[in-house]
Image: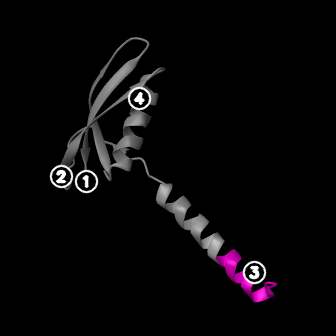
Amino acid sequence: MFSTGHDVMSKLVTLFTVVILSLLSCTSFAAVQVSEAPQNQQQMGIIGATALSDLGTLEEKLGEKAGRLGGTSFRVTSAVGNHLLHGTAIVYQ
């Protein structure tokens, strides 16, 4: 009926492992912004993002989105708007 010290420790190790693996799978890395198409990478798609503040925030959002898609770099192709910015970028891998 009662758990032994070994059972409790085993359950804690399993729980810890599950938590760490779930955190790692949720982690994404932002792609690097480039000014021209990288010669050693292939275009994998076009993305868009919207930002309320400034161009830097828009570029950051595009980089995060490109990274989530598996891209290693991205090139901004458009950025328009006054208070609400919308931009597009080509993603490379």
Indicate the amino acid at tag 2: Gln
Label 3: few (<14), some or many (≥20) within 10 Å?
few
Image coordinates of residue 3 in percent, x first then y, are 79, 84
Label 4: few (<14), some or many (≥20) within 10 Å?
many
x 65%, y 70%: residue = 16
Please say if 70 is above or below 24: above
Specify start and end residues of the magenta stretch as a single range: 1-13
x 39%, y 26%: residue = 50
- Give whichever of 17, 43 is nearer the camera: 17
Indicate the amino acid at tag 4: Leu
Report the disc number at residue 42: 2
Residue underneath mark 3: 8
Image coordinates of residue 60 in percent, x first then y, are 43, 36
Please say if 11 is above or below 5: above
Indicate the amino acid at tag 1: Gln
Residue underneath mark 4: 58
For the residues labelled 1 and 2, say whether their Cβ atoms are less than 8 Å apart: yes
Disc 2 to disc 4, C-alpha distance:
23 Å
Disc 1 to disc 4, C-alpha distance:
20 Å
Disc 2 to disc 3, C-alpha distance:
50 Å
- Give whichever of 21, 31 is nearer the camera: 21
For the residues labelled 3 and 4, say whether their Cβ atoms are less than 8 Å apart: no
Please say if 75 is above or below 29: above
SS at mark 4?
helix
In primary-sequence order, the first of circles 3 and 4 is 3
Residue underneath mark 1: 93
Q: Main secondary structure of the magenta part?
A: helix
